Amino acid sequence: VNISGQDKLDLLLISRIGCLRAGTRFNSRGINDDGNVANFVETEQIIVTNKAVASFTQIRGSIPVFWEQEKSKQVTLTRSLDASVPAFTKHFLDLTSTYNYTH
């Protein structure tokens, strides 16, 4: 892309689908005991110019507690929140280990 005769700009968009808690969107929900959430996707945006390279990574996934959702769209917690704490904690420790600074 040329912007008004300025330097060349390349934009790359890469998405990676997680495989640690696989399943179709409406059949796999929540978290497992290993701290892996369903429907996890990491998307990286990279901008390259003649002068610089910049990158931004964004992640998304299912809410990290044990839950399910029937066709009625009613959400049901399948374990208590206290029982979800170990997997929830592991999930966020894994995220900070992989991505360092997260917010």
Image: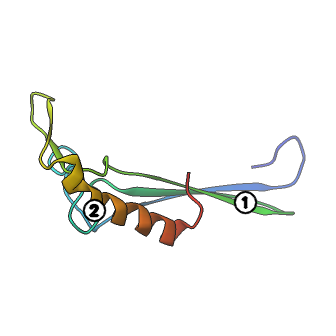
x then y, percent, for residue 11: 66, 54
- Measuring from the top left, give residue 24's x and y in whole percent: 19, 51
Q: Residue at x 30, y 53 (%)?
A: 39
Query: How many numbered discs, if any?
Result: 2
Q: Is residue 21 left or right of residue 49?
A: left
What secondary structure is found at the residue carrying circle 2? helix
Residue 99 coordinates in the image, percent (x, y) = 54, 66
Q: Residues within 10 Å of mark 2 (few under 14, many from 20)?
A: many
Vertical arrangement, residue 22 with respect to residue 26, above or below:
below
Disc 1/disc 2 C-alpha distance (Å): 33 Å
Q: Which residue is mark 2?
A: 87
Residue at the image point whose x is 72% and y is 60% from the top: 54
Q: Residue 45: x percent and y percent? A: 60, 55
The amino acid type of the residue labelled 1 equals Ala
> Which quadrant holds residue 72?
top left
Question: What residue does disc 1 label?
Answer: 54
Which sits earlier in the primary sequence, circle 1 or circle 2? 1
Instruction: Work out whether residue 94 or residue 57 is closer to the camera in this orientation and state it.
Output: 94
From this view, report whether residue 7 is shown above or below residue 75: below
- Asked if the residue at tag 2 contacts the one at tag 1, i.e. Cβ–Cβ closer than 8 Å, the answer is no
Which residue does the image show at 31% across and 48% down from the upper left? 62
* Crowd band around label 1 with a 10 angstrom C-alpha radius: few (<14), some (14–19), many (20+): few
Identify residue type, mark 2: Ala
Q: Residue furthest right?
A: 5
Q: Quadrant of residue 47?
A: bottom right
* Figure coloring: rainbow
- In this rendering, position of residue 63 left or right of residue 9: left
Select label 1 or label 2 by which is in front.
2
Q: Return the residue nearer the eye: 76 or 83.
A: 83
Q: Is residue 15 visible?
A: yes
